[in-house]
Amino acid sequence: MLEPLEIRCSVGESAGRRVLLGFAPARLLASLSFADVLNEDTRTGYQRRFNSQHSQDFRRYIRQAGASTIPLTLNLRPSPSAWRVKELGDGQAQLVIDPAAGKIMAQVDCQHRLGCLGDSDISLPFMCYIGLSVDEEMEVFRTINSKAKGLSTSLLDFHDAHLAGDLASDRPELFVALHLNNDPESPWYRQLDLGGTSTSGMARRASLRTMQKAIKRFLNATRILKTKSTEHAAEIVLSFWKAISEVLPEEWSNTRKHILNKGLGVYALMDIAADLYREAPDATRVNRNYFVNVLADFAHHVDWTTKGQLNGLGGEGGVRPAVDYIRDVRKRAHLKAVG
C-alpha cells in the first residue's frame, strides 16, 4: 500500500482567505494540478485556452541561471478524502495527500508556467488556497488576470455572466449576446468565441465581446429597454439575425468572402437593425417576418463581399462609413421601387 504524499508548508492568510505557502518540484506540482479551461460545449471551467508557445517560453526562461518566478497560485478543490491539512503549530502544516487522489489542485494562476514543466525537478514556490469553490476560484482568477496581456475580453465577459446575480438587468447587452449564442434556433448558435475551447468543430465567426458591443449600439439607438424587457429585446435581435441568414443565405454561409459575421458586419448590421426597429409602424409586430420583408427590398443590392465597397474598412472606426453605404443602397433601392 502506497504511503500518503506529504508536503511541508507554512499556513496563514492572504487577506481574508486561508492559504498554504510552500516549495515543491515542478513535476510534483504539475502532477497534482490541472488548468480548468473553459469548455464552451459544456459551459464548465473558466480559464483561457492553453498557449503552448507561452508555456515553452517560460520553460526556457526558468531553466536559465538566475531565473526565478513569483509563487504559483493553486487551489485545493474541496474533497472529503483526497487531502487534508495537518496543523503542526507555530504556523506550520503538513499537506497530506492520498496517493490515488490524482489532480487535486486547480491552477488558478500558473497554467502556462507549469504547462511544460511536467518533467522538471526545478523547485518552485506556491501559494495554495484551501477549499475555494469554483466560483470563488473564478473571482480570484479574474481579479489577477483582468488586465493580463492575451487574456480574452470575451472570457472575462463569460466570467461576468456566470457570476452576475441578475445579468438581464446588470449587463443587458451581454444577456442578449449569450442568448444568440445559446439558443439552438439562432444562426449564431455556439458560433461566438467565448475564449475557451470547443470540440464541436463549428467555426467561430465573431467574439462574444464584439457581439455584445454591437448589441449595445442597438439598445442605445432604439431605447427599447425603456419600454420592453431585456428578454423581449433578445427575441427582437434574434429575429433580426434569423432574417439576415434567411434573406442572404449564401453571404451568411460563405464567411471567407463576405463580411456579414465579421466584426465590421456585426456592428453595421446591428445599426441597420436599429433603423428597421425604429421605423416599424407597429413595434408589437416586429418579428422575423417583418425583418425578412424589409431586408428583401434592399439587402441583395448591397455588396457584402470582402473585396467590394466595404473593402478596407475595419474595426469600430469603419462602422460609420459601412452603415452610411448600406443606408444609401437602401435609399436608392426604395427610390427605384417607387419610381
Image (cartoon, rainbow, N blue to C red):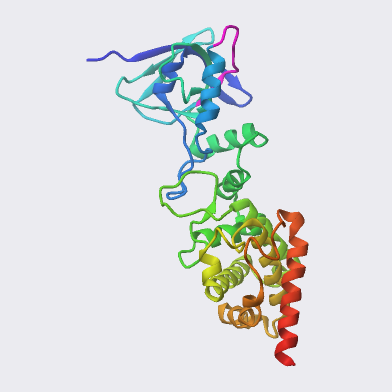
300 to the left or right of 184: right
Name the main secondary structure of what is drawn in magenta: loop
Q: Evaluate whether residue 109 shows in this view.
A: no
Residue 318 image point, x, y percent:
75, 58
Magenta stretch: residue 68 in it? yes
Where 121 sits versus 218, above or below? Answer: above
123 to the left or right of 148: left
**Which residue is at a point 42% across and 20% down the rendered structure image?**
118
**Which residue is at a point 74% across and 74% down the rendered structure image?**
327
Point out the stretch of residues depicted in magenta: 64-74
68 to the left or right of 74: right
Where 75 sits versus 290, above or below? Answer: above
Where 337 sits versus 286, above or below? Answer: below
Residue that protrudes farthest toward the front in the picture: 307
Q: Nearer the viewer, residue 1 or 28?
A: 28
| Quadrant of the image occupied by residue 296 | bottom right
| Quadrant of the image occupied by residue 62 | top right
Which of the image's four quarters has the C terminus? bottom right
Q: Evaluate whether residue 143 shows in this view.
A: yes
**Which residue is at a point 51% across and 56% down the rendered structure image?**
191
Residue 336 image point, x, y percent:
72, 87
Residue 299 image point, x, y percent:
63, 76
Residue 116 image point, x, y percent:
46, 23
Which of the image's four quarters has the N terminus? top left
Q: Nearer the viewer, residue 175 or 152?
A: 152
